[in-house]
Each structure stands twice: as structure tokens, then as C-alpha cells.
Amino acid sequence: MTTVDRTGRTGADLSKRDRKAHERNLTRLQARLQVERARADFAGTLNALEDKLNVPKQVGRATDRAKVRLRRFANEQPVAAAAAAVGVVLVAGGIVWLVVRNATKP
């Protein structure tokens, strides 16, 4: 790769001093680009951590996924979905009945 300074001279035409200044400037530019990349990576990592550690957001996402799965299940197998709903109601009713019965015992 041929280096060109701001006057349009190529690396072979540059003096030793100008060549070193040009290389120093390239190094600074490369360092600045690396810093910008590192900052972008760090920001992305922080955003990912914030998403992972935000419990309400994770609960909301899990709830949305469960709703989608249940709707799909109900649309694909309506009889099985109805049977599952009846089973859930019976279990919940049984738990309530046991709690009430044990709470009212003398």
C-alpha cells in the first residue's frame, strides 16, 4: 500500500521526518478507531446485561411467549385445550376446597 501525504506525495517521495509523522498520524487514527470499536462493544455488552438482569422485562417476555404457545395449542387442538382448562380448574378448585376445609376445622 502506498502512503500519500496531504500534498499528494507518495511514501517514496516523503522525507524521513514526514514519513514518521505520517505513520504517527496513522497510528493515532488506528488507536481512535480501536477506542470507538471498544466503546461500541462495551455499550452492547452493557445493554445485553441490562436486558438479562431486568427481571420485569424477562417476566413480560416469558409471559408473552407462553400466551403465544397457549393460543397456538388452542387453535391446533381445541379439544385437548378444553380438557386441559377443565383439569386446571378442577385442581385449583380442589386446592381451594382443601384450604377452606382445613381452615374451618375446629
Image (spheres, grey):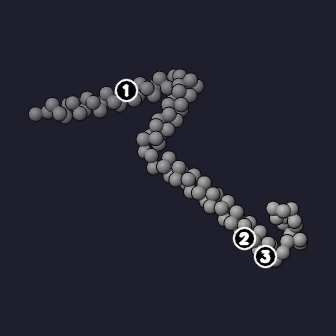
Rendered residue at 46%/37% (across/down): 60
**Residue placed furthest toward the front:** 7
Q: Secondary structure at mark 2?
A: helix
Question: What kind of residue is marked 1?
Answer: Val
Could you say which quadrant of the image residue 20 lies in? Answer: bottom right
Q: Is residue 67 left or right of residue 20?
A: left
Residue with the mark numbered 2? 24
Q: Nearer the viewer, mark 2 or mark 1?
A: 2
Q: Is residue 89 left or right of residue 81?
A: left
Rendered residue at 45%/49% (across/down): 53
Give whichever of 33, 71 is nearer the camera: 33
Question: What kind of residue is marked 2?
Answer: Arg
Of the numbered discs 2 and 1, the one sitting upstream in the chain is: 2
Query: Marks 2 and 1: CB-CB under 8 Å?
Result: no
Q: Nearer the viewer, mark 3 or mark 1?
A: 3
Question: What kind of residue is marked 3?
Answer: Arg
Residue 89 numbered tag: 1
**Residue placed furthest toward the left:** 106
Q: The C terminus is located in which quarter? A: top left
